[in-house]
Amino acid sequence: MSFLGPKGTFTHEVASKLSDNLISFCTIPAVLESVSTGECDKGIVPIENSIEGSVTQTLDLFAHKYNLKILNEVVLPINHNLIVNKGVKLEEITDIYSHSQALGQCQNFINQNNIQPHFAISTANAVKSIVGMENAAAIGNKKAAELYDMDILIDNIQDVSNNETRFVVVSNHDHVPTGNDKTSIAFSIFEDSPGALYKILGIFYEANINLAKIESRPSKKGLGNYIFFIDLVGHRLDENIKNILGRIEDNTSFFKVLGSYPIFQR
């Protein structure tokens, strides 16, 4: 299984629970490419955070470049920790390093302690980068602290306690029906068609299908053109869902099923 690395990231934490045979890649496109080419049978990438919202790069790659399918989803509680070299005290810290999303999710702590933030490629790289630095800290998880033999000075420094990230396992096929499934789709509506989105949403309403998520992203074809992403309850092979997806495809200019997979059980 490929994962968004390096070792010590939250993605690595999730991946290590799913497989013992892991290969690290430094970008989301590289993870998806490894699955698309057959180098790896599965890959795992983040797709959504409860505070920062969707990982837009993941959505855009699903829509525009890769014909992969979502096989599973995993939701991980995100606990951000203040990681330092051994013996470093809070009042000595002048600079803090982490991934942009982690910094954004700990903004209150950073501001209250008047610490200068710096972007890193990942939380794990942030921890690695401060090894030996007496006036610096990093935001990361316990796995990263253990990996680089660092101390956790303060745990759970995130602004919101119920911070969670949703990850998706991707493959060249999706999951067989389980009876408790979710289907992700992407579509664009016809231009200059009043009420087109309302018409699509009405199809779900008429069929009494629950929508778990809906959002839009620029289609990259000019201002005012969007791709809509919807997660709906049900499997694409369910007869009812199959009929609904057929109706939506007939009424959209672009349509893509991103996969059907079991709903994550907490």
Image: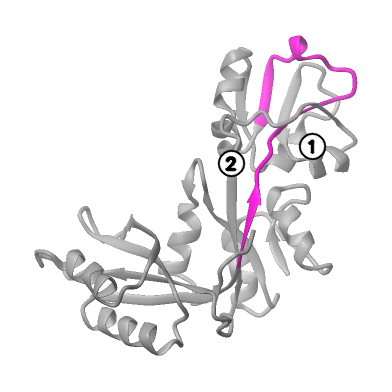
Lateral position of residue 261 relative to residue 124, left or right: left
Would you say 235 lies left or right of 203 here?
right
User: Quadrant where the C terminus lies?
Assistant: bottom right
Identify the magenta region. Answer: 73-97
Mark 2 element type: loop
Front residue (pair 188, 129): 188
**Residue sitting farthest toward the bottom:** 239
Disc 1, SS: helix
Residue at position x 73%, y 70% in the image: 1
Q: Nearer the viewer, residue 135 or 245?
A: 245
Mark earlier in primary sequence (2, 1)? 1
Q: In which quadrant of the rendered view does residue 33 lie?
A: bottom right
Q: Residues within 10 Å of mark 1 (few under 14, many from 20)?
A: some
Q: Which amino acid lies under the numbered mark 1 shown in the image of this protein?
A: Lys
Indicate yes or no whether the magenta region holds residue 96: yes
Q: Is residue 176 magenta?
A: no
Question: Quick check: 117 above or below 244?
Answer: above
Q: Which residue does the image show at 51% across and 77% down from the upper left? A: 260
Determine the image quadrant of residue 65. bottom left
Which residue is drawn at the image coordinates 65% and 71% (left, top)? 34
Q: Residue at x 61, y 60 (%)?
A: 45
Q: Nearer the viewer, mark 2 or mark 1?
A: 2
Q: Is residue 5 left or right of residue 151?
A: left
Residue at the spot of label 2: 163
Residue 137 locus on image (x, y percent): 74, 24
Placement of 52 over or under 257, stated as above or below: above
Residues under labels 2 and 1: Cα distance? 24 Å
Q: Check residue 2 in the rendering and tell me which mark sits there, or answer none.
A: none
- Residue 223, percent across and down? 22, 53
Q: Position of residue 82 (x, y in %)?
A: 73, 28
Residue 189: x and y in percent read 22, 69
Query: Residue 128, which numbered label?
Result: 1
